Amino acid sequence: MLSVIFSAFKKKRSLEETVIKIQNGDLLLRNELIENFKPFIAKAVSSVCRRYINESDDEFSIGLIAFNEAIDKFTSDKGHSLLSFAETLIKRKVIDYIRSQSRRQDVIVDMHSANEGDKLEAYLETEKSLQEYEKTKEAERRKEEILHYQMLLKEFDVSFSDLAEHSPKHADARKGAIAIAKIIVEDQELNEILFTKKRLPIKQLEERVKVSRKTIERNRKYIIAVSIILNGGFLYLNEYIKGAIDE
């Protein structure tokens, strides 16, 4: 069913083109997109609730709002599709909703028929299920982020094996290289040279940092790798940068 709807919609225009038009103010197109993807929304919500969801359910309304939010926030420059982004956002919002309701314990069990032990057991079971789901999705997001990062590194002719071989061995050297990467990302001229010409602006860096050309060239691949992370909004890989700075 979903594949038929998606194929029919795709014949008219790509999802990316549709989203751009919607973000530019096409309200009719927004309503059309949401209407066409209601089955997708219901399916995403059902996978969290583990039961059939129809349009009269509160959880479906949460999913609908989340899908609409996904349309507004989606950008294609992160390497994600609208549907994968929307699915993640829908499930996250539904989980938050279930948790907020669980605190009142009026959606987990019937307050009039269940004893306190049943309520607690049901609550704990729901929390465990949600935590397992979140762990699985986080692992998927980490993997997706790493694959996207690997693709960007390839544009600079840098591989993970290169980084393992050429990364600075000492903490001070790593901090120095990270500091250079920050200078590149924060400087419009240097940033443009790096990401348009796919090379490190060594000559310009020599004028801005108190580090020898030899040191810059020795850490070239590491500086490029860190610059990509700082410039690309990588949630999980940024943890590595913070860890290296705090060493």
Image: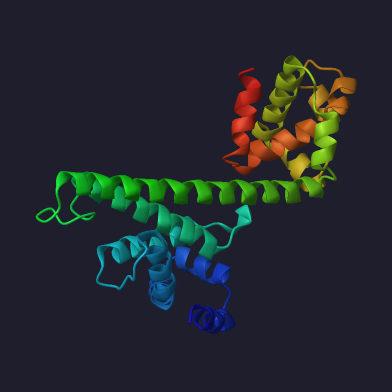
Res. 37 image quadrant: bottom left
Q: Which residue occupies the foreground of this view, 227 or 44?
A: 44
Q: Which residue occupies the foreground of this view, 52 or 183?
A: 52
Identity of the residue drawn at 69% across and 27% down = 183
Instruction: Report the side of 210 relative to 50 (left or right).
Output: right
In which quadrant will I find the C terminus?
A: top right
Instruction: Report the side of 130 relative to 4 (left or right).
Output: left
Spot the residue most to the right: 214
Visible residue check, residue 29 = no
Q: Relative to 20, is 146 above or below? A: above
Res. 41 image quadrant: bottom left
Res. 195 image quadrant: top right
Identity of the residue drawn at 81% across and 33% down = 164
**Measured from the top left, where is residue 149 in percent x and y?**
70, 46
Coloring applied to the structure: rainbow
Instruction: Report the side of 110 relative to 132 (left or right).
Output: left
Q: Which residue occupies the foreground of this view, 225 or 197?
A: 225
**Measured from the top left, where is residue 109 in percent x and y?**
20, 55
Visible residue check, residue 4 = yes
Identity of the residue drawn at 80% across and 28% down = 167
**Measured from the top left, where is residue 85 in percent x and y?**
51, 58
**Measured from the top left, where is residue 229 in percent x and y?**
66, 38
